[in-house]
Amino acid sequence: MKKKQHLDRRLGGSRLEEKIINRRIKLLGVFVILFGAVLCSRLFFLQVRDFQYFSALARGQQHSFEVLTPPRGNVYMTSKTGETFPLAINKRFGLVYVVPKEIKDDEDFSQVVSQILGKDPVELAKKIEDKDNYYKVLASKVEQEKVSELKKMNLKGVKFNEEILRYYPNKNFASQTIGFLGHESQKRVGQYGLEEYFNKILAGKEGYRQGQRDAKGRWIFSQKEEKEVSQKGADLYLTIDYNIQYQAEKVLAKHCEKWQAERGLILVSDIETGKIMASANWPNFEPNFYEKEKNLSIFQNDATERIFEPGSIFKVITMAAALDSGKVTSEMTYTDVGKLNIDGWTIENYDGKAHGVQTMTQVLEKSLNTGAVFAQQQVGKEKFKEYVEKFDFGKITGIELPGELSGNINNLNSNRDINYATVSFGQGIAVTPIQFLKAVSAIANQGIMLRPYLVEKKVFAGGEEEITQPQIKREVISPEAAAYLSAMLVSVVESGHAKMAQIPGYFIAGKTGTAQIPNLDIRGYSDWTIHSFVGFFPAFAPQFIIFVKLDKPIGVRFAEGSAVPAFRELAQYIINYYEIPPDYEEETEK
């Protein structure tokens, strides 16, 4: 009996185990079926429903599209002999980076590398302290000599790459004229100066390349590859003469520093063509490191992007209108009583004195405000405004620089006597230096106005050349009026307030200006002044014109002591450089 019970228990246990096993087999079967269903479903989605998507994705991984960026065009200056000097070029630089986890001794590594790269060792140490970084850039724009030096050291963890960047070999030279290549929306674009104005033709035309790559990213050359070759940017050859520009910058810096001027400018132009031979700004900047400049106003070119009240140099324009209209002659007189009352305002001479009977030539020699008002009144308001507009004040010159301002002659729209009176001696009117250079150049050029320009020629990728031709704007005054005015301006240098402009053996024509700077808070004028001088030579067969401007000089009252000596120094250099024969032989003492 006991034996039978024991057997029954064993048989019952076996059936229970069998049931458990069967249940597990069924669960496993269900799992296999479900897994198979999920797998089949997934395969269906991948191979059927999403076929197009994954097919496109695969093609995208194999297919590659690459934009081909062309070399940017170069910019060159020239000399009188035709020799060229690079102002903006493309240069290969090194990009130095490091794999931090491969550096064992951060301090020793930073000390060694910092000496070569000229970097702060503490800053370099910070860059490599995070060992989880796959790589860290140590320096960009690294000169090839320094890259070679680092490579020779065979330092573990240091890697190199190459980048082609815009390079300005003359550093600060003509910086406001050239501008720089900056960043805009992740693209490299020209900003300020010629780089901005000619950005499109300097940049050239982008190309592209599309085709297949292998698993390692290498191009697979086949008939399916499509390619459009990029086109190099055009090269620019400037009218700027390297040697005159160099001397202009040297002279400008010398006199700005001497008189602690806030800003300064010198322009030099060829009178017969309108070519700009030099355009110097002070202070300037280095385009290679433009990002270091905190004061963005330093990028502005004062020749075109800043206006100023010209002061007494504008008397040249007033006298041009009076002579050309036939209302005055160089020997016509008026009586200077020292002051004038117009519309309740008092106008005085700079020295507050009455000079009695004076000729129009003496008005310029002594820079008499009352004499300028007299000349303007002879012309009349309507005709005077016509001459101001005829000289293109209130209009841009069209020179190849961005952001050119047109000046402000709105006071001549008021028809008020006082506004016309003040404009006659350069107050209440705002001009740019390039406008004024252009206007006085017309007087030197027998009354013919030319458009100033900076680019001599453009040379395109295919070798085609586009040469700039001098462009005549109009005759602003007659040759006779221009000749009389030139003689009067020679007298200003010989007998007036510009004696320091004299160069033995040469007739120099010129006019000084010492203009008060407007104070907008009090609707009047401050004690600060702008000193300027415009002069051309040889006066009766002129070749060159120079405009000098110093803003807020300290320790010198009038332009005769600041701007005029700067003009003379540069004019003497140009005379020697171009070997201009003298107008007359100097008398020697016996």
Image (cartoon, rainbow, N blue to C red):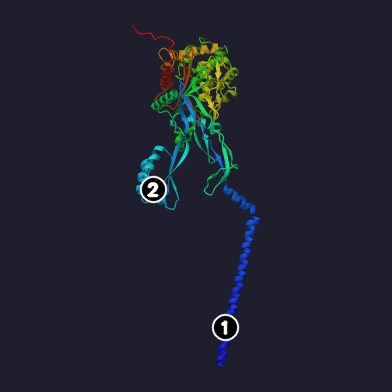
- As drawn, which residue projects farthest toward the left? 590
Tell me, yes or no, whether the two marked residues, 1 and 2, touch with CB atoms within 8 Å.
no
Give the vertical position of 333 relative to 38 (above or below): above
Closer to the observer: label 1 or label 2? 1
- As drawn, which residue projects farthest toward the top? 590
Residue 100 visible somewhere in the drawing: yes
Instruction: Compare residues 38 and 546 and report the one nearer the observer.
Output: 38
Picture coordinates of residue 52 (x, y %)?
64, 52
Give the vertical position of 139 relative to 464 (above or below): below
Picture coordinates of residue 62 (x, y %)?
57, 48
For marks 1 and 2 on the same chain, the one whose residue lies earlier in the sequence: 1
Name which quarter of the figure residue 185 lies in. top right
- As drawn, which residue projects farthest toward the front? 222
The quadrant in which the N terminus is found is bottom right
Picture coordinates of residue 376 (x, y %)?
55, 17
Give the vertical position of 396 relative to 294 (above or below): above
Count residues near mark 2 (Cα–Cα under 10 Å), then give few for <14, some for 14-19, many for 20+.
Answer: few
Count residues near mark 1 (Cα–Cα under 10 Å), then give few for <14, some for 14-19, many for 20+.
Answer: few
- Which residue was labeled with disc 1? 13
Residue drawn 37% across the image and 51% down it: 104
- Tag 2's secondary structure? loop
Which numbered dot is residue 156? 2
Instruction: Compare residues 432 and 448 and report the one nearer the observer.
Output: 448
Q: Which amino acid does label 2 sit on?
A: Lys
Picture coordinates of residue 496 (x, y %)?
44, 15
The quadrant in which the C terminus is found is top left
